[in-house]
Image (cartoon, helix red, strand yellow):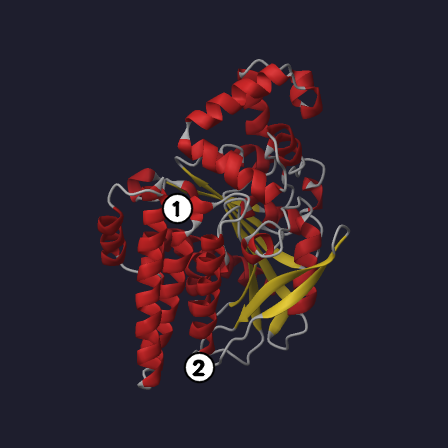
Amino acid sequence: MHDEFGTWMLGYTPYGGGDYGDVAAVAAQVGEGDDGAFYDAWVAAGDRAAAEAGTAAAAGHRSSAEELYLRASAFYASAYHPLYGTPVDPRLLHAYRAQVRAFDRAIALRRTPVRPTEVLLPDPARGSVRMPVYLIPAPGHEIEVRPLLILVNGYDATITDMYFASAVAALGRGYHCLLFDGPGQGGVLYEQGVPLRPDWEVVVAAVIYHALESAIVDRDRIVVSGWSLGGYLAPRAASGDTRIAACIADPGQWDLGVPVRALLQRFGATPHQVADPALLDDAVLDRVIETVRADPGLAWGVLRRGFWANGVTDLRGFLTQTLRFTLRDRVAGIRCPGLLTRAENDPLAAGVADFAAALSAPTTVLEFAAAKGAGEHCEMRNRSLLNRRVLDWLDDTLASQDRP
């Protein structure tokens, strides 16, 4: 699990998130250590980079300072994933706040400084939720009206991750980019305790209203793009908002309940029971929990991340909430061109063919092979390949919409 979390950054290497040597040095320091050792090594790396950034800024080396602050933000973001769960670990909050502080300092050093803002999202339980938002203009096009790419995160990534994974490449193509944390993500979860919600069309609508206040946004070319769980959230947004000109889902997902129902049936649940977790026998749930606890990856993904991000305290609640994430009754509302990715070894991409077949709007499926180093979840071992192909598709799609 440490290898998986610790090597995420290698996918960001082409975009300034850190080099192989940074990862190797931290790995050597962690060795066979526990989650605390993992955390300490990454935070120490972040502290060193942030200190170097401050020195560079004081000496007038703005470009070096920006680069180092960005790298520090990636180091801090790498530190706390093993600490997920409730009650919230104070170390997680410390590293997250350091991550945001470093990122904010970096983008404030750009030729056109970027300042974070907040969008208030109405919430029945809380009145409103504060969502951090960054609208980053494309370099060299800061005052031009350009297409806007709204980037949607998944279960456990944050604004910083999305910046390196997608925004840097898109900014280089001339797209303005909007990054935000929504319910169940980043600071909205960590600081405010707000869980995920399936109706992402409401979330993105609030973000679009905010974006349209900017004079540099082309209101006819607003694109939404999501990775990981965002591969469901982005199409969900497109199903309820005709202002979205194109939708990218990496990987394409339209019903999170499919793998859940299949799993429950393997443990003896009937088709009638898997349709409603309230009907599940306790014996079935006990067998599932026993299997999950025996696998460190599953235990983290379900019992720690899954429960926390969904605002539930038991498996029945987690299953009930997961079944709400479906587009089957909304897929007809997606009318914009769509791009679905399918990496060869990504289990979340299993339903891409069915999703594509259900869409009536023009839809493209991009395949990514392990032989090209892009066969894993979200093509993390070759993000540059993913970004080239996705942005080529987006360039062509928006250009075709400009024609009479």
**Quadrant of the image occupied by residue 198:** top right
**Quadrant of the image occupied by residue 33:** top left
Whether residue 73 sits left or right of residue 289 in the image: it is left
Q: Position of residue 113 (x, y in %)?
A: 49, 79
Q: Please, what is the three-letter code of the amino acid marked with disc 1?
A: Glu
At horizontal 51% and vertical 79% (from top left) the residue drawn is 142
User: Closer to the observer: label 2 or label 1?
Assistant: 2
Which quadrant is home to the N terminus? top left
> Mark 2 or 1 closer to N-term?
2
Q: Which mark is residue 379?
A: 1
- Is residue 210 shown above or below 345? below
- Is residue 166 shown above or below 318? below
- Is residue 187 shown above or below 156? below
Q: Which mark is residue 111?
A: 2
Q: Please, what is the three-letter code of the amino acid marked with disc 2?
A: Arg
Which quadrant is home to the C terminus? bottom right
Decide if residue 276 is in sight here.
no
Q: Position of residue 361 (x, y in %)?
A: 63, 46
